[in-house]
Protein backbone atom coordinates (compact mmCIF):
# COMPACT_ATOMS: atom_id res chain seq x y z
CA UNK A 1 0.00 0.00 0.00
CA UNK A 2 1.19 3.51 -0.85
CA UNK A 3 -0.07 6.36 1.34
CA UNK A 4 -0.05 10.09 0.71
CA UNK A 5 -0.39 12.81 3.35
CA UNK A 6 -1.58 16.21 2.22
CA UNK A 7 -0.31 18.21 5.17
CA UNK A 8 2.47 17.43 7.65
CA UNK A 9 1.22 18.94 10.90
CA UNK A 10 1.03 17.30 14.31
CA UNK A 11 -1.84 14.92 13.51
CA UNK A 12 -0.38 13.75 10.19
CA UNK A 13 3.04 13.25 11.82
CA UNK A 14 1.43 11.27 14.66
CA UNK A 15 -0.48 9.01 12.26
CA UNK A 16 2.69 8.39 10.25
CA UNK A 17 4.60 7.54 13.42
CA UNK A 18 1.85 5.14 14.49
CA UNK A 19 1.86 3.49 11.06
CA UNK A 20 5.57 2.72 11.27
CA UNK A 21 5.17 1.34 14.80
CA UNK A 22 2.35 -0.94 13.68
CA UNK A 23 2.27 -4.16 11.68
CA UNK A 24 0.70 -2.45 8.68
CA UNK A 25 2.45 -3.32 5.43
CA UNK A 26 3.31 -0.01 3.83
CA UNK A 27 5.38 0.20 0.67
CA UNK A 28 5.89 3.96 0.65
CA UNK A 29 4.49 7.19 2.09
CA UNK A 30 4.43 10.44 0.12
CA UNK A 31 4.22 13.65 2.11
CA UNK A 32 3.55 17.17 0.88
CA UNK A 33 6.36 19.73 0.82
CA UNK A 34 4.23 22.47 2.40
CA UNK A 35 6.07 22.47 5.76
CA UNK A 36 9.63 21.85 4.62
CA UNK A 37 11.08 21.59 8.14
CA UNK A 38 8.69 18.87 9.29
CA UNK A 39 8.79 17.11 5.92
CA UNK A 40 12.59 16.88 6.03
CA UNK A 41 12.54 15.55 9.61
CA UNK A 42 10.05 12.82 8.68
CA UNK A 43 11.99 11.98 5.53
CA UNK A 44 15.21 11.66 7.55
CA UNK A 45 13.55 9.57 10.25
CA UNK A 46 11.68 7.07 8.08
CA UNK A 47 13.27 5.49 5.00
CA UNK A 48 9.93 4.77 3.29
CA UNK A 49 8.96 8.44 3.22
CA UNK A 50 9.34 10.53 0.06
CA UNK A 51 8.72 14.27 -0.13
CA UNK A 52 6.57 14.88 -3.21
CA UNK A 53 7.34 17.66 -5.68
CA UNK A 54 3.81 19.00 -5.28
CA UNK A 55 0.37 18.01 -4.00
CA UNK A 56 -0.85 16.64 -7.32
CA UNK A 57 2.09 14.23 -7.60
CA UNK A 58 1.33 13.01 -4.07
CA UNK A 59 -2.27 12.28 -5.02
CA UNK A 60 -1.35 10.56 -8.29
CA UNK A 61 1.26 8.30 -6.67
CA UNK A 62 -0.79 7.20 -3.65
CA UNK A 63 -3.44 4.50 -3.20
CA UNK A 64 -4.87 6.30 -0.16
CA UNK A 65 -4.75 10.08 0.32
CA UNK A 66 -5.03 11.58 3.80
CA UNK A 67 -6.27 15.17 3.98
CA UNK A 68 -4.45 16.64 6.97
CA UNK A 69 -4.64 20.38 6.31
CA UNK A 70 -6.55 23.11 8.12
CA UNK A 71 -10.13 23.88 7.02
CA UNK A 72 -8.93 27.19 5.56
CA UNK A 73 -6.28 25.50 3.43
CA UNK A 74 -8.63 22.66 2.50
CA UNK A 75 -11.32 25.00 1.21
CA UNK A 76 -8.70 26.77 -0.88
CA UNK A 77 -6.68 23.95 -2.46
CA UNK A 78 -8.91 20.85 -2.71
CA UNK A 79 -10.94 22.27 -5.60
CA UNK A 80 -7.70 22.88 -7.53
CA UNK A 81 -6.52 19.26 -7.36
CA UNK A 82 -7.55 16.24 -9.40
CA UNK A 83 -8.60 13.00 -7.70
CA UNK A 84 -9.35 9.85 -9.67
CA UNK A 85 -12.95 8.71 -9.31
CA UNK A 86 -12.38 5.84 -6.85
CA UNK A 87 -9.28 7.14 -5.07
CA UNK A 88 -9.54 6.35 -1.35
CA UNK A 89 -9.64 9.63 0.57
CA UNK A 90 -9.46 9.94 4.36
CA UNK A 91 -10.13 13.40 5.73
CA UNK A 92 -8.88 14.71 9.08
CA UNK A 93 -10.38 18.16 8.40
CA UNK A 94 -12.70 19.09 11.23
CA UNK A 95 -15.20 21.50 9.65
CA UNK A 96 -15.40 20.46 5.99
CA UNK A 97 -18.36 18.12 5.75
CA UNK A 98 -18.66 15.04 3.56
CA UNK A 99 -20.91 16.78 1.03
CA UNK A 100 -18.33 19.53 0.46
CA UNK A 101 -15.46 17.03 0.31
CA UNK A 102 -17.28 15.10 -2.42
CA UNK A 103 -17.94 18.32 -4.31
CA UNK A 104 -14.32 19.50 -4.09
CA UNK A 105 -12.76 16.16 -5.02
CA UNK A 106 -15.48 14.84 -7.37
CA UNK A 107 -15.06 11.58 -5.48
CA UNK A 108 -17.46 9.48 -3.37
CA UNK A 109 -14.88 7.17 -1.77
CA UNK A 110 -14.31 9.39 1.27
CA UNK A 111 -14.13 8.70 5.01
CA UNK A 112 -13.95 11.38 7.69
CA UNK A 113 -11.91 10.52 10.77
CA UNK A 114 -10.96 12.11 14.09
CA UNK A 115 -7.42 10.96 14.95
CA UNK A 116 -5.72 12.46 18.01
CA UNK A 117 -1.98 12.89 18.74
CA UNK A 118 -1.89 9.70 20.89
CA UNK A 119 -2.29 7.73 17.68
CA UNK A 120 1.49 8.02 17.36
CA UNK A 121 1.67 5.67 20.37
CA UNK A 122 -1.09 3.48 18.90
CA UNK A 123 -3.42 4.69 21.63
CA UNK A 124 -6.71 6.50 21.87
CA UNK A 125 -10.04 6.56 20.02
CA UNK A 126 -10.39 6.99 16.25
CA UNK A 127 -13.87 7.98 15.09
CA UNK A 128 -14.70 7.18 11.45
CA UNK A 129 -17.67 8.16 9.31
CA UNK A 130 -19.23 6.65 7.34
CA UNK A 131 -18.40 3.06 8.35
CA UNK A 132 -15.82 1.56 6.00
CA UNK A 133 -14.30 -1.89 6.48
CA UNK A 134 -10.91 -1.13 4.92
CA UNK A 135 -10.51 2.13 6.86
CA UNK A 136 -11.56 0.38 10.08
CA UNK A 137 -9.02 -2.40 9.47
CA UNK A 138 -6.33 0.23 8.90
CA UNK A 139 -7.00 2.29 12.02
CA UNK A 140 -7.55 -0.69 14.33
CA UNK A 141 -3.76 -1.07 14.18
CA UNK A 142 -3.41 2.45 15.54
CA UNK A 143 -6.11 2.81 18.19
CA UNK A 144 -9.67 2.01 19.24
CA UNK A 145 -11.99 2.48 16.26
CA UNK A 146 -15.45 3.95 16.81
CA UNK A 147 -17.69 3.78 13.73
CA UNK A 148 -20.63 6.18 13.52
CA UNK A 149 -23.44 6.36 10.97
CA UNK A 150 -24.39 10.02 11.27
CA UNK A 151 -22.21 12.99 10.42
CA UNK A 152 -24.26 15.07 12.85
CA UNK A 153 -23.16 12.79 15.69
CA UNK A 154 -19.51 13.33 14.75
CA UNK A 155 -19.79 16.95 15.87
CA UNK A 156 -20.00 15.78 19.48
CA UNK A 157 -16.77 13.79 19.14
CA UNK A 158 -14.99 16.73 17.49
CA UNK A 159 -16.11 19.00 20.33
CA UNK A 160 -14.98 16.54 23.01
CA UNK A 161 -11.57 16.19 21.38
CA UNK A 162 -11.08 19.89 22.19
CA UNK A 163 -10.64 18.96 25.86
CA UNK A 164 -7.02 17.89 25.51
CA UNK A 165 -5.57 21.29 26.49
CA UNK A 166 -8.07 21.76 29.39
CA UNK A 167 -7.15 18.28 30.65
CA UNK A 168 -3.45 19.12 30.68
CA UNK A 169 -4.21 22.48 32.28
CA UNK A 170 -6.09 20.73 35.08
CA UNK A 171 -3.02 18.56 35.64
CA UNK A 172 -0.76 21.62 35.49
CA UNK A 173 -2.84 23.64 37.98
CA UNK A 174 -2.92 20.66 40.33
CA UNK A 175 0.86 20.24 40.21
CA UNK A 176 1.33 24.01 40.67
CA UNK A 177 -0.77 23.78 43.83
CA UNK A 178 1.43 20.96 45.11
CA UNK A 179 4.52 23.08 44.44
CA UNK A 180 2.93 25.91 46.47
CA UNK A 181 2.82 23.43 49.37
CA UNK A 182 6.61 23.04 49.31
CA UNK A 183 6.72 19.94 47.09
CA UNK A 184 9.44 19.89 44.44
CA UNK A 185 8.27 20.51 40.88
CA UNK A 186 9.47 17.17 39.51
CA UNK A 187 7.88 15.21 42.35
CA UNK A 188 4.61 17.14 41.99
CA UNK A 189 4.36 16.58 38.24
CA UNK A 190 5.33 12.91 38.49
CA UNK A 191 2.65 12.36 41.12
CA UNK A 192 -0.06 14.09 39.09
CA UNK A 193 0.92 12.25 35.89
CA UNK A 194 0.78 8.88 37.64
CA UNK A 195 -2.50 9.77 39.39
CA UNK A 196 -4.24 10.79 36.17
CA UNK A 197 -2.81 7.79 34.30
CA UNK A 198 -4.06 5.39 36.98
CA UNK A 199 -7.51 6.99 36.96
CA UNK A 200 -7.75 6.67 33.16
CA UNK A 201 -6.57 3.06 33.17
CA UNK A 202 -8.94 2.23 36.04
CA UNK A 203 -11.90 3.56 34.05
CA UNK A 204 -10.91 1.37 31.08
CA UNK A 205 -10.34 -1.69 33.29
CA UNK A 206 -13.78 -1.19 34.85
CA UNK A 207 -15.51 -0.67 31.51
CA UNK A 208 -18.58 -2.63 32.63
CA UNK A 209 -19.32 0.21 35.03
CA UNK A 210 -20.66 3.52 33.77
CA UNK A 211 -18.62 6.65 34.40
CA UNK A 212 -21.34 7.85 36.76
CA UNK A 213 -20.95 4.64 38.75
CA UNK A 214 -17.21 5.28 38.99
CA UNK A 215 -17.94 8.74 40.38
CA UNK A 216 -20.00 7.13 43.15
CA UNK A 217 -17.49 4.34 43.77
CA UNK A 218 -14.61 6.78 44.22
CA UNK A 219 -16.32 8.54 47.12
CA UNK A 220 -16.70 7.62 50.76
CA UNK A 221 -19.32 9.32 52.98
CA UNK A 222 -17.74 12.36 54.58
CA UNK A 223 -14.51 11.80 52.65
CA UNK A 224 -12.39 14.32 50.79
CA UNK A 225 -13.39 13.13 47.31
CA UNK A 226 -17.05 13.70 48.16
CA UNK A 227 -16.16 17.13 49.57
CA UNK A 228 -14.20 18.29 46.50
CA UNK A 229 -16.91 17.06 44.12
CA UNK A 230 -19.61 18.83 46.12
CA UNK A 231 -17.65 22.11 46.22
CA UNK A 232 -16.93 22.02 42.47
CA UNK A 233 -20.62 21.48 41.79
CA UNK A 234 -21.47 24.46 44.04
CA UNK A 235 -19.08 26.60 41.97
CA UNK A 236 -20.88 25.37 38.82
CA UNK A 237 -17.59 23.94 37.53
CA UNK A 238 -19.32 21.18 35.56
CA UNK A 239 -22.08 23.44 34.25
CA UNK A 240 -19.38 25.68 32.80
CA UNK A 241 -17.82 22.61 31.20
CA UNK A 242 -21.13 21.71 29.52
CA UNK A 243 -21.63 25.32 28.43
CA UNK A 244 -18.20 25.40 26.80
CA UNK A 245 -18.84 22.06 25.07
CA UNK A 246 -22.10 23.41 23.66
CA UNK A 247 -20.26 26.49 22.44
CA UNK A 248 -17.47 24.57 20.68
CA UNK A 249 -20.06 22.11 19.30
CA UNK A 250 -21.53 24.94 17.22
CA UNK A 251 -18.17 25.45 15.48
CA UNK A 252 -18.52 22.08 13.76
Image (cartoon, helix red, strand yellow):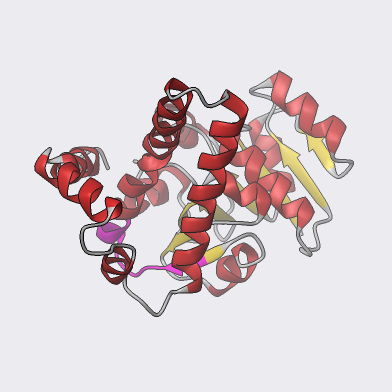
**Relative to 61, is 159 on the left or the right?**
left
Residue 247 vertical position relative to residue 2 in the rendered view, above or below: above
Which residue is found at the position 49% from the left and 30% from the top? Answer: 77
Q: Nearer the viewer, residue 148 or 91?
A: 148
Q: Quadrant of the N terminus?
A: bottom right
Q: Quadrant of the C terminus?
A: top left
Q: Quadrant of residue 245?
A: top left
**Relative to 228, is 203 on the left or the right?**
right
Which residue is found at the position 29% from the left and 62% from the top? Answer: 219
Q: Nearer the viewer, residue 221 or 129?
A: 221
Which residue is found at the position 43% from the left and 40% from the top? Answer: 164
Magenta segment range? Answer: 145-154
Is residue 43 shown in magenta? no
Q: Quadrant of residue 45?
A: top right
Residue 230 vertical position relative to residue 220 in the rendered view, above or below: above
Residue 104 vertical position relative to residue 87 in the rendered view, above or below: above
Q: Residue furthest right?
A: 47
Which residue is found at the position 42% from the left and 42% from the top? Answer: 104
Q: Nearer the viewer, residue 196 or 250?
A: 196
Residue 122 at x, y percent in the picture: 65, 56
For the question of whether residue 209 can be seen, the reply is yes
**Relative to 12, is 33 on the left or the right?**
right
Q: Residue furthest bottom?
A: 208
For the question of whether residue 125 can be seen, the reply is no
Residue 170 at x, y percent in the picture: 38, 35
Residue 159 at x, y percent in the picture: 31, 45
Amino acid sequence: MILGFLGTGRIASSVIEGVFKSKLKIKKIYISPRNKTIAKKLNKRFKKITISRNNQQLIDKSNWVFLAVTPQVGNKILKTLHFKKNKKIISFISTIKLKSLKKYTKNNNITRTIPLPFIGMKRGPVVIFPPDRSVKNFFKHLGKVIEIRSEKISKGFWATSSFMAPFYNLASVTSDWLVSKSIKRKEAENYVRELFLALSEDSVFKNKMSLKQLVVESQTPGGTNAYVLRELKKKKFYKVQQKVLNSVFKKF
